[in-house]
Image: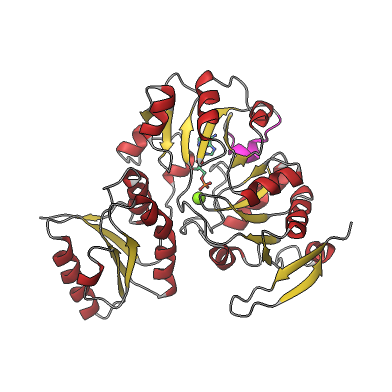
Amino acid sequence: MRVCVLTRVVNFCALCYHTIMIDDIFSSSISYIDTVLCDGETPANISAAAHILKQGGLVAFPTETVYGLGADALNADAAAKIYAAKGRPSDNPLIVHIADVEDVYKLATNVPEQATLLMEAFWPGPLTMILPKRELVPDGTTGGLKTVAIRMPSHPIALSLIRESGVFIAAPSANTSGRPSPTTAEHVYEDMQGRIEMILDGGAVGIGIESTIVDLTGSIPTILRPGFITKAMLENIVGEVAIDKALIEPDPNLRPKAPGMKYTHYAPKGKLSIVETSDVVASINSLISDYTGKGYRVAVLASAEHADEYQCDNILTLGQANKGETIAAHLYGALRECDARSIDYIFSESFYQTDLGGAIMNRLLKAAGQRVIRDE
Ligand code: AMP
Ligand code: MG
């Protein structure tokens, strides 16, 4: 089959379009792949992406949380390509994306009542459920675990891609392992150019941090990763919900249930510290002056309330401190911007104030390697 794709050429300044043939994408190379960046809302591009997935290739696509790097979840060779493209450790399992609730039962067994209730309440949406896997899900997709992570995203491009390809899509975030997750197609291009066949551009994502992960293999649903769907929202549907120990007390000796939790994540190249002193603005200004005085490039991740009070060339405002959704949406972009500006030291305010504070601070603390500056 020859499928035409209208693409935006991989130059973000010049919006030029050209037509390529899907066969050319595959013939381009084995080690270096000519990555096609194209408009994800164009049906022909979704068809081309679906074709790539069916052939065992890699496509990055927008979801409502962050951009995903997708491959056929039931094809172990395709899933292996995700690990290679990201440089991801092979014991860090992938989330399988589906477009119809019934598909859960094709991938998982012993689906408890609580899972059914949560699917009804939050799917399609930013909730991933861990369930016992069926035989057909390859170990290569689950990092050798006997459980599988499943989510139904709500982004229309993601749903169309899953439906049109007819495959379940294994997709972690579409960043190089360890880097901040991508919230725009440009971020994906930065990391994945030359490594994957196609990127569907759907603009900036809505939520900006990864899905909430809930383990449903025990008697009490347990949060393994906080996200947009909060503990209170889950409890509203299923009663008692626990938080995994590794989230409460990060301990290197504790084997986390979500293997991904043990790896460095979301980290910018510069050294990030979170400042939680009694006078945050004064402390950060003093740190800025110390470090710029030593010749380093310094940035601040600021709330809108305090942004004007910093004496710094690189102030990245995440949003009003009481608007968790705005802060979440800007967080990863700001960390990447620090890299783009070759920042050496980053100082961030804390953002605990909202319902999303737990999820935001989970990402920020990981990005900071848990470094927090407090009063002495
Ligand atoms: P990401 O790579 O950002 O998509 O993150 C996927 C997360 O889901 C990682 O932290 C994984 O460890 C976690 N995960 C995926 N599958 C499982 C599973 N079967 N059990 C526990 N955690 C999982
Ligand atoms: Mg990730």
Does the image show residue 109? yes
State which quadrant residue 348 falls in: bottom left
Residue at figure coordinates x 50%, y 31% from the top left = 121
Q: Quadrant of the N terminus?
A: bottom right
Q: Say whether residue 97 is left or right of residue 165.
A: left
Which of these two is toward me, 117 or 89?
117
* Up-down relation of residue 246 to residue 282 (above or below): above
Q: Residue at x 52, y 53 (%)?
A: 66
Q: Indicate yes or no whether the magenta region holds residue 142.
A: yes
Residue 196 visible (yes or no): no
Look at 36% across and 73% down and name the residue there: 343
204 is within the stretch colored magenta: no
Residue 47 is situated, as x and y percent measured from the top left of the image, at 77, 54
Seen in the image, is 65 located left or right of residue 160?
Answer: left
Answer with left or right where residue 8 lies relative to residue 285. Answer: right
Instruction: Report x, y in % for residue 198.
Output: 69, 61
Figure check: 165 above or below 345: above
Question: Which residue is located at x 62 percent, y 57 percent?
Answer: 85
Identify which residue, 294 or 120, lies in the foreground: 120
Number of disc labels: 0
Image quarter hosting the C terminus: bottom left
Q: Identify whether 224 is placed above or below 286.
A: above
Percent x, y for residue 102?
67, 28
The colour scheme is: secondary structure
Magenta span covers which residues?
Answer: 136-144
In this orientation, which residue lies closer to the viewer: 240 or 156?
A: 156
Residue at the farthest left position: 376
Q: In x, y percent, where is residue 360?
A: 36, 49
